[in-house]
Amino acid sequence: METVPEPGSNVPPKKDRLQTKKKKPRRYWEQETTGTAAGASPGPPRKRKRNRELRPQKPKKNDTSKKFRMSKKPRELKSPRPQRSLSGAQDPFAGPAPVSVEVVQKYCRIDKSKELPHPKTKTRSRLVVAEAQEEETSVRAARSELLLTEEPGFLEGEDGEDTAKIRQADIVEAVDIASAAKHFDLNLRQFGPYRLNYSRTGRHLAFGGRRGHVAALDWVTKKLTCEINVMEAVRDIRFLHSEALLAVAQNRWLHIYDNQGIELHCVRRCDRVTRLEFLPFHFLLATASETGFLTYLDVSVGKIVAALNARAGRLSVMTQNPYNAVIHLGHSNGTVSLWSPAMKEPLVKILCHRGGVRAVAVDSTGMHMATSGLDHQLKVFDLRGTFQPLSARTLPQGAGHLAFSQRGLLAAGMGDVVNIWAGQGKASPPSLEQPYLTHRLSGHVHGLQFCPYEDVLGVGHSGGITSMLVPGAAEPNFDGLESNPYRSRKQRQEWEVKALLEKVPAELICLDPRALAEVDVISLEQAKKERAERLGYDPDARTPFQPKPKQKGRSSTASLVKRKRKVMDQEHRVSGHRGRAGHPKGNALLLAPLASSTCHFSPVSPYPGQNPPEPGAAAAEAREGQAHGGPAVGPGQIRALSQAPGPRRNILSPRPPVGNYPSLE
């Protein structure tokens, strides 16, 4: 007989309800725990609350002797746990990213091969700190190359095709629309021929015609900034430190205009100017005139720094070295002279051509100079101290204008043809065997300049302005803090203030800027020698020590000799410790026996009112000391003691001597 089930009999018990619960999702950093109930979620173990009431509390001991007891076994250092992120994952590439040694060496500016012979301890510590900072800076610069996403362009022919036969129309068709818009022609035959200049950022273009036409524009967007006619012949035009100021060499005087075409200044001391060059880090405007004068004008204060007479007739060829800000002038006798405002005579004179020099250009590294002359020769010279020609080429027509790009391409204007030669890299000279590009214009060339940070060559000719595309000519990446083509007006003003605070004085312009950090020992010694000859004695020479006479038998001959020897040994010990602080055997040299040394003194009295020592006495005393087998000690190495009343005190030793020395008393 079947029985009726009781109500609620199909409901599982409480313990079985746990099995029917849904499993909690397990995170990937949580591990499965053993011994859990079947179906239970393997979550993190729960902290059990201790029942402090049930456990008996141990009485506290007042013995404090064990509190400071040292454990016999040393504590084992725990191994550092791997660092994890918030999600719990471990970084597979821990630490800084590796950097290749070749890239770091490219940014290093300290030559570690040159070491001081015996530097002092303080000097050596400073050098170590400077080298560490330079190495860290080089590593940071090498690691930041990842941010330089742009790469230089290039032009290659198909199946050995000569790139000089590629026309500008073919290049425009092959590039993108934004690059193709950078090639244009301005037909301005009415006011030509033209001279042109790009701003340092490469965004603005200024040009001036021989018949008075002056204009400035943003050539990327083709937005005209200003356009005026000065009603006078324009011979050259240059941007100053920013695109807001413009210097124009007119037929009679030098004029300064702003970006609205308003005349701000008329510098009448710079008259009949033929060429202009602006030095951006020195705020100097260099002008070459028909009268043969090279004038430097400081545009920050409006003062003429130097006016140098080149004594070579009319000056119509001038350029600057971007590396050291030295001005190069070409003369009609075939020489090129290098000038600095700190010198009244040229730094270097180089005989370059048999005829007159027509054009000069210097690359951005300051290592190579290109010249062309009336002898139809195009030469590339080495400016790294030898000043010898590296390569030469005879052109059917002499090049009247030359220009270097940021990556070392050389452009030459010959009549109505522009030829461009390329090298192996930025620091290598251009190869004059085969031209890289060739372009024919509608008029004779009168001005050339590569646009900074753009693969563009600007050409001013009798028919107007032409913008050529030259792949691989410019640096693909720019420094946003130095030359930012996209800067706003506020950023430009802040940059001007910073540039004025960091202005380099004109007196520091020299051939080798690295020599400014070195000490000119030869000139210093020569100045000391000339001063001693002019005065008849050396004012820097120290008088010999003469002991003060004492009473009660303490002025005997043996006592005087003993006191003299003590002072001499003390000075020798201090000078040796300072000079050989970095020597590995310095302590051994300081602990050498002192009793065997022999010293000779000069009979000149150290008291005031006496005649000064004769010149050459120090060298004679030194030679006499060496002849007797002792150290070369002369009057210049002994200092007199204080003549003030009171106890005797040695003024030579500001600190106690190093080491244990034998007593001389």
Image (tube, rainbow, N blue to C red):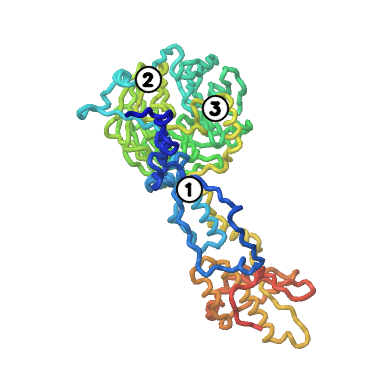
Badge 1: how crowded within 10 Å, few (<14), some, or many (20+)?
A: some
Amino acid type indicated by mark 2: His
- Left or right for 336, reference 174: right
Q: Residue at x 20, y 28 (%)?
A: 159
Q: Residue at x 32, y 33 (%)?
A: 422
Of labels 3 and 2, earlier in sequence is 3
Q: Quadrant of residue 636?
A: bottom right
Question: Residue under circle 3?
Answer: 242
* Direction bottom: furthest residue: 553
Whether 460 is drawn above or below 84: the answer is: above
Q: Secondary structure at mark 2?
A: loop
Front of the two marks 1 and 3: 1
Question: Residue under circle 2?
Answer: 444
Mark 3 to mark 2 CA distance (whole Å): 30 Å
Mark 1 to mark 3 CA distance (whole Å): 33 Å
Which numbered marker is on residue 136? 1
Mark 2 to mark 1 CA distance (whole Å): 52 Å
The C terminus, quarter of image? bottom right
Residue 394 in percent (x, y) is at 30, 33
Q: Secondary structure at mark 3?
A: loop
Amino acid type indicated by mark 3: Ser
